[in-house]
């Protein structure tokens, strides 16, 4: 068969997480609570950093944008999954599947670059404190953010450009609750070995390379931190441990899904839950519960909202 688009598949069927109605009800409650909590927590961080002048610094600017990206990350696939838990026949249109893949990789690629920017911010703050404000200027922060979104967009478009014209003429069942490239290309009625290698190179190797780059940078920072006084050491370790936790939670599932040569559906589904449900809610928990300034800012914001509520 030639490389033209001979698709006759107009929709894909999700097999979901489980066929047990009782487990689906538990998942419905669990995922709904996590989704609301994740949206609330990340929105609180975005508004707190935007409104509170005490948080107008490079670190919190990047943190607020991480929360904004997490709002997108948990909204790409989770609402559809929650909706499908009500339904026996879980389907998504061909265009909807392509759109889901597009936004998953835009958001994922952008978050990857933003985590690098946050590591750079901590490196400069800890290792070059006298040059911090000069290096992490508002212009640099905006440039890093712009670069994150541009790279995320290029990363997503570069992959979809190769797979969007694949011919689909038969199987249309995806053993998951969302669309992504590894399962999408398997349904094409043509040889996709090279396509699979391209996806591994684009998503897998980039994820692994970035992960090890970040871990090495944090090890270098930790070595530098050892020279700090005890008070500064404690604060730096608290901040760095939060960053490292987020990095591991984000990159762990990505590396496994795109690099592991022997994929297993139950593990892939579990890692997808971690990526879309657990990580977005853990980010605000990690950064707020371990950060005194954030807790104070959220408290001030809550008081302001309560006052506005009383007025209206």
Image: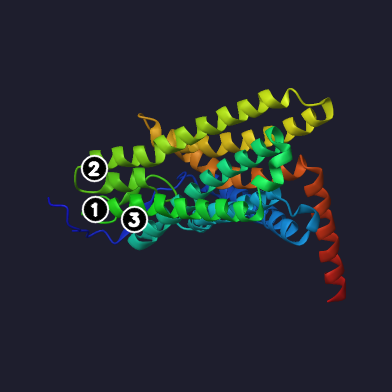
Give the residue at mark 1: 166
Which residue does the image show at 65% across and 55% down from the upper left?
138
Give the residue at mark 2: 192
Do the CB atoms of the residues marked 1 and 2 lie less than 8 Å apart? yes
Quadrant assignment, res 223? top right
Q: Which mark is residue 230?
A: none
Which residue does the image show at 65% across and 36% down from the upper left?
123
Q: Earlier in the sequence, mark 2 or mark 3?
A: 3
Query: Percent x, y for residue 292?
Result: 82, 43
Q: Earlier in the sequence, mark 1 or mark 2?
A: 1
Which residue is at the far bottom? 312
Query: Percent x, y for residue 38?
Result: 65, 51
Q: Residues within 10 Å of mark 3 (few under 14, many from 20)?
A: many
Left or right, residue 238 beside residue 68? right
Query: Percent x, y for residue 132?
Result: 70, 43
Q: CA distance from mark 1 to mark 2?
A: 9 Å
Give the residue at mark 3: 12
Label 2 residue SS:
loop
């Amino acid at each position: 068969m030639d490389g033209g688009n001979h698709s006759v598949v107009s929709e894909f069927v999700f097999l979901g997480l489980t066929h047990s109605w009782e487990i689906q009800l538990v998942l419905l409650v669990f995922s709904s609570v996590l989704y609301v909590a994740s949206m609330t927590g990340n929105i609180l961080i975005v508004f707190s950093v935007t409104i509170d002048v005490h948080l107008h610094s490079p670190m919190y600017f990047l943190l607020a944008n991480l929360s904004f990206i997490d709002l997108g990350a948990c909204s790409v696939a989770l609402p559809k999954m929650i909706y499908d838990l009500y339904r026996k026949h879980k389907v998504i249109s061909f265009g909807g599947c392509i759109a889901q893949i597009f936004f998953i990789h835009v958001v994922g690629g952008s978050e990857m670059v933003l985590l690098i920017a946050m590591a750079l911010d901590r490196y400069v703050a800890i290792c070059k404190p006298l040059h911090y404000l000069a290096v992490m200027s508002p212009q640099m922060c905006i440039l890093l953010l712009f670069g994150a979104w541009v790279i995320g967009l290029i990363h997503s478009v570069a992959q979809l450009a190769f797979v969007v014209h694949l011919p689909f003429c038969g199987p249309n069942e995806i053993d998951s609750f969302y669309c992504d490239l590894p399962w999408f290309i398997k349904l094409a009625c043509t040889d996709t070995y090279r396509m699979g290698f391209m996806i591994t190179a684009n998503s897998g190797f980039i994820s692994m390379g970035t992960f090890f780059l970040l871990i090495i940078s944090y090890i270098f920072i930790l070595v530098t931190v050892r020279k700090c006084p005890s008070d500064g050491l404690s604060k730096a370790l608290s901040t760095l441990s939060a960053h490292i936790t987020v990095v591991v939670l984000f990159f762990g599932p990505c590396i496994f899904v795109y690099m592991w040569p022997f994929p297993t559906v139950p593990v892939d589904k579990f890692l997808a839950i971690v990526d879309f449900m657990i990580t977005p809610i853990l980010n605000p928990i990690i950064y707020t519960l371990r950060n005194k300034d954030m807790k104070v800012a959220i408290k001030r914001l809550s008081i302001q909202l309560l006052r506005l509520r009383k007025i209206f």
